[in-house]
Amino acid sequence: MATVPSPEVLRAPLVVEFPFTRSLGPVQSAFLTGLRERTVLGVKTSDGRTLVPPVEYDPVTAEEIRDLVEVHATGTVTTWAWNHEPRRGQPLSGPFAWVLVKLDGADTALLHALDAPGPDAVRSGMRVRIRWAAERTGAITDIACFEAYEGQEAGGEVGPHDGVFGEPVTGIVAPARLDYTYSPGRAQTKYINALSDRRTVGERCPSCHKVYVPPRGACPTCGVSTTDAVEVGPRGTVTTYCIVNIKAKNLDIEVPYVYAHIALDGADLALHARIAGIPYDQVRMGLRVEPVWTEGARFPDHYRPTGEPDADYDVYKELV
């Protein structure tokens, strides 16, 4: 008997990216402003340890620490890992080593990049020094990287520093980015493929008989696999909703607009979608809606009222 091949499970690259904006306290402000001025600052704890990068509270005792000290721009590699394929936004464009460096005068290590010709040129215990960026703005990237250094450990005590610089850095914007490959799995692959045919297909639990849309591949209540496909909708009922008053970046929708949970006919789980074709202040629980598709779309652009009488609350109350 011939075997019917399973449909290919979808996979696609996905990027999650956003700017993280934060203000700086006096210690971090002094540290980053110091980097702009080619000065590395740490903090001295009550038991005499010098922490670089500096923190505002002792990680051992939790006491507040504010005594700034200047350490040297040379140091020793304590451990390392070779990065053979740098990614977007990393310090160097070619292969390099990630290193933890204990700067001379410090008792803790600073993580940064080491410019080296290959992994054979890197070892724990090697001496390095800071290579400063040509243009510095008050960020950790003001240290362009570390480079090999033949000198000995810098002698002398580290000196206290008042942390005062002109035009101090008081806040930073750190871009956060995550690149990965996403796969929706068997159940949602079937769901997405059905949407391309303008059909909404869920899966029924063989135990409790609930129909889940979008399907999850297993019943969250019974814990058993769901493989019985069930077409639902296309019409449904608004179970609850919210009015959006803040315009999202790169989303060409005028505010205010309504985002709602919609229980499609025949489904036991509400999905969410935008409601249009009705003033935002007339959207209500129980409103009967239907999907609106645009040419070539793989999913409904929005849902609009069908003109039917509102559904009775008892019909959808378990899905609110």
Image (cartoon, grey):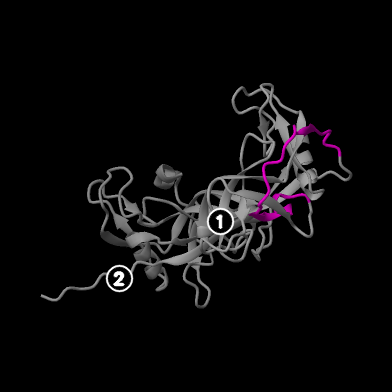
Q: Is residue 117 magenta?
A: no
Q: Is residue 155 magenta?
A: yes
Element at label 1 = strand
For badge 1, the amino acid type reads Ala
Q: Residues within 10 Å of mark 2 (few under 14, many from 20)?
A: few
- Closer to the chain start, of discs 1 and 2, is 2
Residue 92 drawn at (x, y percent): 63, 62
Residue 70 drawn at (x, y percent): 77, 37
Q: Nearer the viewer, residue 275 or 217?
A: 217
Residue 189 drawn at (x, y percent): 37, 65
Residues shaded magenta: 138-164
Residue indicated by mark 2? 7
Residue indicated by mark 1? 97
Q: Is residue 247 left or right of residue 262?
A: right
* Foreground disc of the pair 1, 2: 1
Task: Specify the quadrant of the image occupied by residue 153.
Answer: top right
Residue 118 drawn at (x, y percent): 53, 62
For badge 2, the amino acid type reads Pro
